[in-house]
Amino acid sequence: MTTVLVTGGTGALGRQVAAQLRERGADVRILSRRAGGEPGRVQGDLNTGAGLAEAVAGVDVIVHCASASDWRRSERDVIQTRNLLSAVGRARPHIVYISIVGVDRIRFPLYRGKVDTERLIAASGLPWTVLRATQFHELILLFAMLLSKGPVALTLRGFSFQPVDVGEVADRMVDLALGEPAGRVPDLGGPRVESMADLMRQYLTAARRRKPVVRLPLFGKGAADFRAGHNLLGPGADRGKRTFADYLRDHAAADGTIAAPYELRGRFQRYPRASARPATARKRFQQRPSRKRSAR
Ligand SMILES: NC(=O)c1ccc[n+]([C@@H]2O[C@H](COP(=O)([O-])OP(=O)(O)OC[C@H]3O[C@@H](n4cnc5c(N)ncnc54)[C@H](OP(=O)(O)O)[C@@H]3O)[C@@H](O)[C@H]2O)c1
């Protein structure tokens, strides 16, 4: 039986990777900073290195889905991965890492950290595989929720995305984890390229909300790289099947309620001071139609 450690196994991607690995007969450990009741959970912290030696002991494969995702401190992912690799010591597990399409072409601090992390893994001397994926539907939904809280819904002029279903990314990660080390493999993204404004409109329709969609200009090198489409799939990439519209259909209740896909911690602390009250943060971001509209 293959023993697999999934870092970030409590996150949007890692949860599905861990579940699918179990279905396919692997012995799965999940690394988390939080102790938990679920079977196989190992407590550890990639920032400090605490608990990592126990977490990696005897594993055949590490699926590395954890990320600090802190766009203000892009070096955090590199530090976390360095700590993970040093905990491995002389063992030689296959490390499978998830990165983001366009990280080497988009001048954005968080992406610089991802490129440095890819390089660290490739230079580690361990057998490795790296998959780059486009934005998950969950992230697009979160952007739409955050940017439509005011009287108008804000989008960025010239920005398009090719969002992918996280379950399809998990499928691929599991195939890679149970296969031979393959280095950098073809990128994976969603079936459609859609403008940010179109994605916002789809969200507003699913959430039964009506407000004008405004396209704002964004300046800077990173924004220019997004407008040039470097976050989209290029030739030779693989396309998933499920669209953002499919995702919304499955996640919106009949009254338009859609649960926030991420807890508002870490990277989103700049938005309402959710970090101070994590228990309520999720609730505050659940979007509901106004009473007036739902009464119609
Ligand atoms: N979201 C996207 O659109 C997208 C697209 C392409 C690639 N990716 C990449 O896919 C990966 C997963 O993304 P996601 O959206 O699934 O992430 P997520 O839901 O935000 O989950 C992040 C995970 O990282 C873990 N983590 C963070 N800091 C940690 C620490 N110090 N020690 C141990 N664990 C830590 C968290 O575990 P605990 O909180 O339980 O400790 C959590 O499970 C990331 O590398 C991301 O860059 C994401």
Image (cartoon, rainbow, N blue to C red):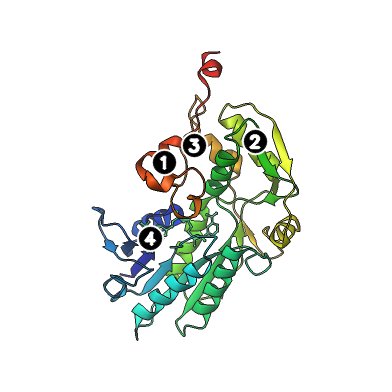
Q: Secondary structure at mark 1?
A: helix
Report if the CB atoms under discs 1 and 3 are less than 8 Å apart.
no
Q: Nearer the viewer, mark 1 or mark 3?
A: 1
Pick the front one: 263 or 139: 263
Cα separation between marks 4 and 1: 31 Å
Dot 4 or dot 1: first in sequence order is: 4
Along the polypeptide, which appears first: circle 1 or circle 3? 3
Q: Earlier in the sequence, mark 3 or mark 2?
A: 2
Report ligand 1 position as a quadrant. Answer: bottom left
Mark 3, other Cα within 10 Å: few <14 / some 14–19 / many ≥20: some
Quarter occupied by residue 102: bottom right
**Within 10 Å of the Cα at label 4, are there few (<14), some (14-19), or many (20+) other Cα atoms?**
many
Whether residue 268 sits left or right of residue 56 in the image: it is: right
Residue positioned 67% across, 65% down in the render? 107
Q: Which residue is mark 2?
A: 153
Q: Which residue is mark 3?
A: 251
- Residue kind at label 4, given as amino acid type: Leu
The crowding category of the residue bearing disc 2, from other C-alpha atoms within 10 Å (few below 14, some 14 to 19, many at least 20), is many
Q: Earlier in the sequence, mark 4 or mark 3?
A: 4
Q: Residue at x 23, y 53 (%)?
A: 37
Residue 154: x %, y % from top left:
66, 40
Image quadrant containing the N terminus:
bottom left
User: Residue at coordinates 72% horizontally, 51% vertically from top-left?
Assistant: 218
- Mark whose residue sits in front, 3 or 2: 2
Q: Which residue is mark 1?
A: 281
Please tell me which of labels 2 and 4 falls first in the chain: 4
Q: Mark 4 highlights which residue?
A: 21
Q: Residues within 10 Å of mark 1 (few under 14, many from 20)?
A: some
227 left or right, relative to 103: right
Q: Mark 2 touching mark 1, by CB under 8 A?
A: no
